[in-house]
Image (cartoon, rainbow, N blue to C red):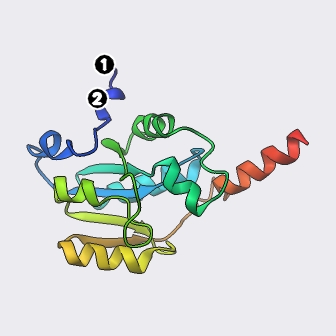
Amino acid sequence: MSSIESKLLEPGQCGAKLSGLQGRIGFCTGCFDILQSGHAVFFEQCKEYCDHLVVVVGRGKNIGKLKPGRPINQDNNRLFLVAALEPVDFAVLGDEEYSMGKIDCVTFCEDVHPDVYIVNDDDSGLDQKRDFSRDRGIELVTVPRVVPSFLQPTSTTEIIEKAKISTS
């Protein structure tokens, strides 16, 4: 098993794997379809609020409901690439279905009882995530989208659009 594979968790079995960890367990959620610098910056921000960062990667069938034609990459490919990033301690696929709007981390939270949920401050599901966290006694932390001065702002959607233009 590679060091990256050892960071992959099975849904519903996270609690057993994480139960002996000391310190704060934090998590974030998202599609993370085509990894780009903004994702790496976000994971670094998340890691500032916890000792162990778990990334809950959204399932393609859920993402497709919100963003037709997405994701580009398959679930396990996205999961593996997210786990390969240094700030990420573990990665797990999200729930089979969304709850409360865009919540796909119910199974993870029931299994692990994490300490902190980190989201971008402009997240379109922020109100639902705030309610979800409050109801479960999970601290919700919002972080701004920041771009270090040496990086050019980008997004996965921009990358996809550029790829479409260059192939047409």
Residue 65 location, x and y as percent? 56, 60
Quadrant for the C terminus, please: top right
Which residue carries the number 1 mark?
Answer: 1
**Mark drawn on residue 74:** none
* Amino acid, disc 1: Met
Q: CA distance from mark 1 to mark 2?
A: 7 Å
- Front-lying residue, 81 or 72: 72
- Judge left or right: residue 104 versus residue 108: right
Asked if the residue under mark 2 is in contact with the one under mark 1, i.e. CB atoms within 8 Å, the reply is yes
Q: Which residue is mark 2?
A: 6
Look at 42% across and 53% down and name the residue there: 43
Q: Height in image: 97 above or below 127?
A: above
Choose the circle earlier in sequence order: 1 or 2.
1
Asked which secondary structure carries label 2, the reply is helix
Can you give x and y, in whole percent of width and height, for residue 80 in the image? 44, 34
Left of 104 or right of it: where is 75? right
Residue, x 50% and y 34% (percent of image)?
A: 77
Q: Is residue 71 left or right of residue 159?
A: left
Residue at 30 percent across and 34 percent down: it is 7
Residue 31 shows up from this direction: no
